[in-house]
Image (cartoon, rainbow, N blue to C red):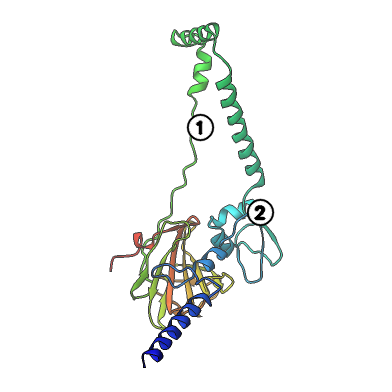
Amino acid sequence: MKYCLVIFCYIIIFLGLFGCSSRNTPAPVVGISSSVPLKDRVKNTIQGTEYTVKKGETLYSISWRANTDVRHIAKLNNISPPYRIFPGQKILLTSKKDNKSSQASRSKTLTKNSTKSTTPTSKNSSKKVLASSKKQAYGKNVRAQKVSKKVVKPSVKFSQKVKRWQWPVKGKVIEYFSNQIQGNKGLNIAGRRGTKIKAAADGKVVYAGNALRGYGKLIIVKHNDDYLSAYAHNDQILVKEQQQVKSGDVIAKMGSTDADQVMLHFEIRFRGKSVNPLKYLPKK
């Protein structure tokens, strides 16, 4: 009897070790309360200076993935509103000229700093600097002084505020906004399949489709030149691109497309950058 019990124990231990070693691929990295694997979030982003347009994409969806303002990309590519693009078209995401000039200025400052540190200062040079400063102090060389006082006023861009925001759906927030590089860029709100998703503010639908991996069936609404909102993982899209919507209009039905549970992923972006929706939505 004891012999049989010992054999039974060895079999259990062997099966346990075999089960641990049989998994060759690691489990997908998911946030504490996230429903979208991190690998899908990273794949969704666009990096680089140039991008080729794919079928079903709009300039808004491309700028969304590039995490930049659509007006910036439109200006680089001389594309005027309503920003029509076509599959196969090559789009500049950053200015090559700006990249070269920034690299040149960076190397120039490095060489200046190196020459300053290596070149010794003499007594005569210090006297010359002192003399020039005295001339300016006593009113001489006034012409040069007047020129230095001229200040070019920078063009200030005032943000266009949205009059009223509302929650797109009622439900429990299962993941909040994060400022981390690979963190959640909005709110994940749990609910039942088929729950009505409403527009968070007045605006125009600038994207409605499933071309953005990691978002499933997605809707992007433009509220003004500064603010956009997004509604992801929908089961059904009830609006079309270029359609005007009012705050509270039903635009989709909740689902789980590109997610492992039924929920709404909701984002707000200001000039292309993700912002915390809780700063805009009314308190529950």
> Which numbered mark, 1 or 2, is in the foreground of this view?
2
Name the spot of residue 146 as percent of width and height, x first.
Answer: 50, 19
Q: Which residue is mark 2?
A: 77
Q: Report the side of 96 relative to 9 (left or right).
A: right
- Residue 152, numbered label: 1
Quadrant of residue 195 within the rendered picture? bottom left
**Quarter of the image with the N terminus in it:** bottom left
Name the spot of residue 57 as percent of width and height, x first.
Answer: 62, 68
Q: Residue at x 33, y 74 (%)?
A: 172
Q: Report the side of 269 relative to 108 (left or right).
A: left
Name the spot of residue 159 as percent of width and height, x first.
Answer: 43, 51
Q: Residue at x 60, y 56 (%)?
A: 47
User: Among all residues in the image, which is located at the extreme left?
Assistant: 284
Image height check: is 170 above or below 46? below
Visible residue check, residue 195: yes
Front-lying residue, 61 or 103: 103
- Kind of residue at badge 1: Val
Front-lying residue, 223 or 284: 284
Quadrant of residue 274 within the rendered picture? bottom left
**Quarter of the image with the C terminus in it:** bottom left
Question: Which badge, 1 or 2, is on the more N-terminal residue?
Answer: 2
3D distance between C-alphas at marks 1 and 2: 28 Å
